[in-house]
Amino acid sequence: MRKSVLGVWEKVEMADRIYIFGAHSRAQTTAVYLQTLYPGLSVEAYLYNNEEPNPEKIGDVPVVKLDKGKLYTNYPVYIGTRGIYHEEITRELRGLGFEKIMPVDAGLDIRLRNAYLERRYADAGQDFLKIDKLKALEDSVPAAVYVAKSIYDAPLRRQYLEKPYEKMIQVGAALTEKRLADCLVADNTGDNISMKNRQFCELTALYWIWKNAEEEIVGLEHYRRHFILPPDWLERMLVNEVDVILPVPLYVAPNLRENYRKRHEPMDWDYMMAYLRERNLREAQEAEAFFERNLYSPCNMFIMRREVLDELCRWLFPVLFAAEEHGGSREDSYDNRYPGFLSERLISFFFEKNRKKYKTIYSDKNFLD
């Protein structure tokens, strides 16, 4: 057994051989995190217990159903699935004799992801800068982080107390007469694209912020996803001359391009890249190289200076509007959100290509159930 390099929060020490429960994106990402942090660690198998189609192998690692094949119950099992399944999977694994079970919940994912990124950035000779590591000062400027909410949001099981700097904004307000009592702002006022909310989701809030908000520093969160910030985050941002705060990057496999094409409609991705090539061939080549990588900041969340937001939106929205005009609307509500899924990758590319121009740092985010 090898002692964890991540600290006492782990319930089991790292072994030389482990299983990972799950065979999709979350499980594969967990494997990359662990094998980067523990060189020589062997993932012996990806496990599953349902009838969904799964590959026979992921790389060279077999994908095994729980009731098939010989399994070693002394191996630790990391559960790399959605959190709503963790309790049931844990019970089933214990019933089979496994004792070292580690559900990769939000807390563990944050710790693994940060440790992985510190290693990756160090290997690349770069600093992995996070808001909670920066020094602060006393003066401040007008700032607001807008939190996107809609009438279709599922209720939270635990109450969330909004921070003083957060402003709730109702998105898709042009599509309904109902108004949310806790939203002081609606995205159908001023210059807006509120009618596009079924496809653009929280991006209708981004557009509204761009065209209508007056604060010098602005941000965007979701009603379920909020940045985990120190109380003096704004002062730290100012004294350290930070231009942008983004969510801690997420690893996806095999790369950003193919991960999107596998999970969404490939046609939308192909059109987006064709549009970029027609608009600016050199920039499109830079984008293609970036999309060969594995890391991006998800969820269309940010905090940034006003002038940075202006440049981002002037660059971003023409691409999304062109993709929308080409792709049209979809019957499936999830597939219909493709402009929002494309923008997650585009925003990450924008700040990578402007790495020398804008100082970008990162913050963890939560996910409320």
Image: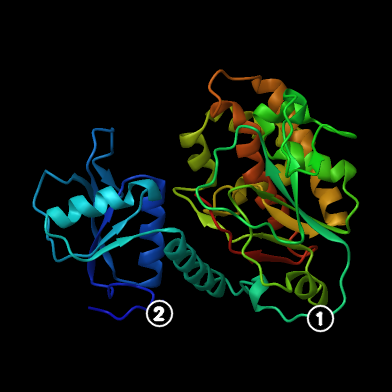
| Distance from the alpha carbon under mark 2 to that under mark 1 | 31 Å
Residue tagged by mark 2? 7
Task: Identify the amino acid type marked 1.
Answer: Leu
Colour approach in the figure: rainbow
Task: Identify the amino acid type marked 2.
Answer: Gly
Q: Is residue 97 above or below residue 123?
A: above
In this rendering, does residue 60 appear at all?
A: no
> Residue 29: horizontal and vertical position, in percent?
41, 55
Q: Name the quadrant containing residue 234.
A: bottom right
Q: The residue tagged with tag 1: helix, strand or loop?
A: loop
Chain-order first, disc 2 or disc 1: 2
> Residue 190: horizontal and vertical position, in percent?
90, 35
Q: Name the quadrant containing residue 275.
A: top right
Residue tagged by mark 1? 137
Left or right: residue 236 compared with residue 54: right
Residue at left offset 23%, top offset 71%: 16
